[in-house]
Image (spheres, rainbow, N blue to C red):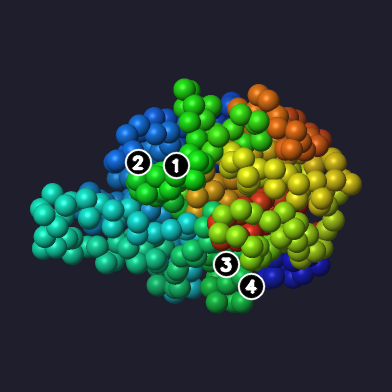
Amino acid sequence: MSARKSNEARIVITGVGLTAPNGNNLAEFRKSLLAGKSGIQKVNVRYMGEVLAGICHFDSLKYQKKKELRRGTRAGSIAIYCAQEAIADAKLDLAGLDKSRIGVYLGITEHGTVETENEIYEIKQFNYDVKYWSHHHNPRVVANNPAGEVTLNLGITGPHYTLGAACAGGNIGLTQGLQMLLLNEVDLALGGGVSESTGSFGIFAGFKSEGALASHPDPEKACRPFDKDRNGVVVSEGGCIFVLERLSDALKRGAKIYGEFMGYAINSDATDFIFPSAERQVECMKLALNKAGISPEDIDIINTHGTGTAEGDPVECQAIREVFGEYPHAYINNTKSFIGHAMGAAGALELAGNLPSFEDYIVHPTINLDHLDPECHLNNLVINEPKKIDKVDYIFNNSFGMLGINSVVIVRRFEGQS
């Protein structure tokens, strides 16, 4: 996606709606990232007792009624909030748009686990009598639920679906929206990712059985990517949805433009269920750069995927060193250190948290990094304090997931029609 393409073939971000454990809109989220404010807290999870997690505190009744909340899902509620906020931020009047030409594309890690666990827990109290099983269960657990709930809430009649892409889901939801605009299947795309993972005891139990569930006496210090004392993942919920438009449409209506998509890539490790491949991550990063028509030296900020695991962090750092080692000027940060791992929402939230850098030239830090693991050494890793830099033209966003799915998105500062 080079700058030489026509405005119809250039895709831009014109709205951002999000909820994270440390903020319920982009301004709040960014303020927390620059202030070093974490959103991790202690919560009680069924069968697990007290664990550390990132919980969102958005106003779920802002765009839904209590009856709708009871019938729907937490992921659907997060998605509705983020979609509505994104549309408001983009200053769009849906009443004046052709809703059959709007698409909703949301990345997820998984869906349906929370609802199924809850139903089994409930009927256990009735000796597993299935007559107590909710008649709302099926529409709650179908994989398209979060995106579908958005269309019901907003009256959107264009295509909608979710993309099961593990923890690469947020980037991949964005990529799908971008592709559908380029294919002229839609005129407006709502793309991003959502997660309700904190509602499932199974995900906490799974990470614990792998020895990869983070713990720390201070919840806000629990997520420690790249620190030699890191001990695992902090499970979080959240959501982030972007309004995506063709540049020609955005210019026509005088929209604020947060940035322009320049490149993306998705590939697969094909090696292991859990353990990542540096070789495939390198290939994914290089493919994204090639699609964007730029070189590593053009990148100003790299947002890392790093989750705080002993196995994953060094692999990503190795891959980054291989791709960017000869071009050490790029500054590197990590957003999970603030909010934990928001699973399907992670990539979208992490990109959103860096977009304001195009305006303020500040790179938010990686927090909780007190003792850098030598295996995770990276040039210009921004540690514990924000860093003011001279230039921010390109942001590079990594997101990787289980079963070896890798994704990269590259966004460029928008400066007119050059």
The residue pinned by badge 3 equals 176
The residue pinned by badge 4 equals 182
Camera sees residue 25: no
Q: Distance of mark 4 from mark 3, alpha carbons?
A: 10 Å
Disc 2 secondary structure class: loop
| Side of 27 relative to 387 (left or right) | left
Camera sees residue 32: yes
Q: Distance of mark 1 from mark 3, alpha carbons?
A: 33 Å
**Residue 105 x %, y %:** 49, 64
Q: Nearer the viewer, mark 3 or mark 2?
A: 3
Q: Residue at x 59, y 76 (%)?
A: 184
Query: Can you tell which mark lies on residue 208?
Result: 1
Q: Distance of mark 4 from mark 2, alpha carbons?
A: 34 Å
Q: Distance of mark 1 from mark 4, alpha carbons?
A: 42 Å
Residue type at mark 2? Asp
Label located before the other in sequence (4 or 2) = 2
Q: Residue at x 44, y 69 (%)?
A: 160
Query: Can you tell which mark lies on residue 59?
Result: 2
Q: Residue at x 71, y 60 (%)?
A: 280
Label located before the other in sequence (4 or 3) = 3
Q: Residue at x 48, y 68 (%)?
A: 103
Disc 4 secondary structure class: helix
Q: How many neighbours does mark 4 have within 10 angstroms: few (below 14), some (14-19), or many (20 or more)?
A: some
